[in-house]
Image: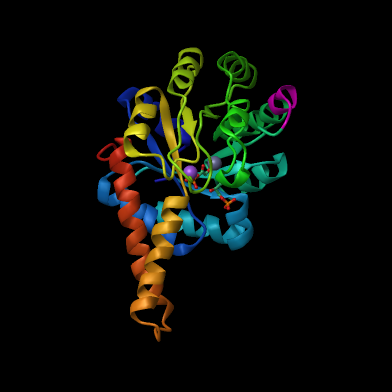
């Protein structure tokens, strides 16, 4: 059934685990996420970025997700990932999403607060959850030095003020992760994460989690991360399988014979993540 992210993350906080938030943009990946959640008896968050919505169409993404969610027994939240405008949030509310992220992290503090508050007020009216971001979680392709990246890390005192002023349900923090594939191993600022968790009593979210070693993910969860976002690792598993199938059968022209195995590969990587997050058997 469809539930809110707040509902899932409250249980995760009580149980000391994290819920996987997996990005989808087509039928195969939606099915892979739900199949993996069922196989692990796990709660899960199905999320679509604005890019995914542009690619598939909001009506298609919502229909795929709602079809999958309607027939499953595991609890699933349908979430907008990195929404950047009030209008996009409202479109997702109308399409039946149970959760939205409003990402005002590029804005000055006061403007991020103002935009986030506006989203919280609509979300409260319709009973859905809101995630916001403070500090900047960049991409691995941003080509900035470690020192430059640290300048964008989330400040614990600002985080406490931000949460008090906005009333959000969950906060994405910048602690050293980045979107996309890492060149080396990411170095996470665990001390900062603990300081944020001590001051912010709502669930914390880790973006850019593909490529973060399992032990580092577990440590982050011990320190208060309750939602772990994964996109790149799914894309990689999916596309590597497509390549392998085509390499083994260069004349294959049936998309089902190519995308079916890719969907299976996605299920496997998502199951692995669910077990690392500690959310297996928590449905
Ligand atoms: O946070 C970014 C997600 O991985 C989605 O990426 O904007 O390419 O769909 P995208
Ligand atoms: P990765 O692609 O690095 O897993 O990041 C995903 C993410 O944070 C989506 O919001
Ligand atoms: Zn993200
Ligand atoms: Na990453």
Quadrant in which residue 133 is drawn = top right
Q: Main secondary structure of the magenta part?
A: helix
Quadrant of the drawing holding the C terminus: top left
Instruction: Indicate the position of residue 30 as horizontal and vertical percent values.
Output: 44, 57
Which one is in front, 102 or 139? Answer: 139
Q: Which residues are magenta?
A: 107-113
Quadrant in which residue 152 is drawn = top right
Instruction: Indicate the position of residue 91 as horizontal and vertical percent values.
Output: 66, 48
What residue is shown at x 48% (from left), y 15% (from top)?
195
Q: Say if 242 sits above or below 274 in the image.
A: below
Which one is in front, 243 or 71? Answer: 243
What residue is shown at x 54% (from left), y 55% (from top)?
62
| Number of disc labels | 0
* Residue 260 visible to an observer of this rendering: yes
Q: Say if 18 sits above or below 164 in the image.
A: below
What residue is shown at x 43% (from left), y 64% (from top)?
239
Which one is in front, 114 or 229? Answer: 229
* Residue 71 visible to an observer of this rendering: no
Instruction: Indicate the position of residue 232 as horizontal and vertical percent values.
Output: 47, 51
Was residue 158 drawn as part of the magenta stretch in this picture? no
């Amino acid at each position: 059934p469809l539930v809110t992210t707040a509902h899932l993350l409250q249980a995760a906080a009580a149980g000391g685990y994290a819920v996987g938030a997996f990005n989808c943009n087509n039928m195969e990946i939606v099915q892979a996420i739900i199949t993996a959640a069922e196989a692990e008896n796990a709660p899960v968050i199905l999320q679509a970025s604005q890019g995914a919505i542009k690619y598939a169409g909001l009506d298609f993404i919502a229909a795929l997700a709602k079809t999958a969610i309607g027939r499953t027994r595991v609890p699933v939240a349908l979430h907008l990932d990195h929404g950047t405008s009030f209008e996009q949030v409202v479109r997702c509310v109308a399409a039946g999403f149970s959760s939205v992220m409003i990402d005002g992290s590029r804005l000055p503090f006061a403007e991020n607060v103002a935009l986030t508050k506006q989203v919280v007020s609509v979300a409260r009216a319709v009973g859905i959850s809101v995630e916001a971001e403070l500090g900047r979680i960049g991409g691995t392709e941003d080509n900035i030095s470690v020192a430059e990246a640290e300048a964008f890390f989330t400040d614990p005192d600002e985080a406490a003020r931000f949460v008090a002023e906005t009333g959000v349900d969950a906060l994405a923090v910048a602690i050293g992760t980045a979107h996309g594939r890492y060149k080396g191993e990411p170095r996470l600022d665990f001390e900062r994460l603990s300081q944020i968790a001590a001051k912010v009593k709502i669930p914390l979210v880790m973006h850019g989690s593909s490529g973060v070693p399992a032990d580092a993910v577990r440590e982050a969860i011990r320190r208060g991360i309750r939602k772990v976002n994964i996109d790149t690792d799914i894309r990689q598993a999916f596309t590597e399988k497509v390549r392998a199938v085509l390499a083994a059968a260069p004349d294959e022209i049936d998309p089902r014979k190519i995308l079916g195995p890719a969907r299976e590969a996605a299920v496997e990587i998502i199951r692995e993540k669910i077990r690392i997050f500690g959310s297996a058997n928590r449905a």
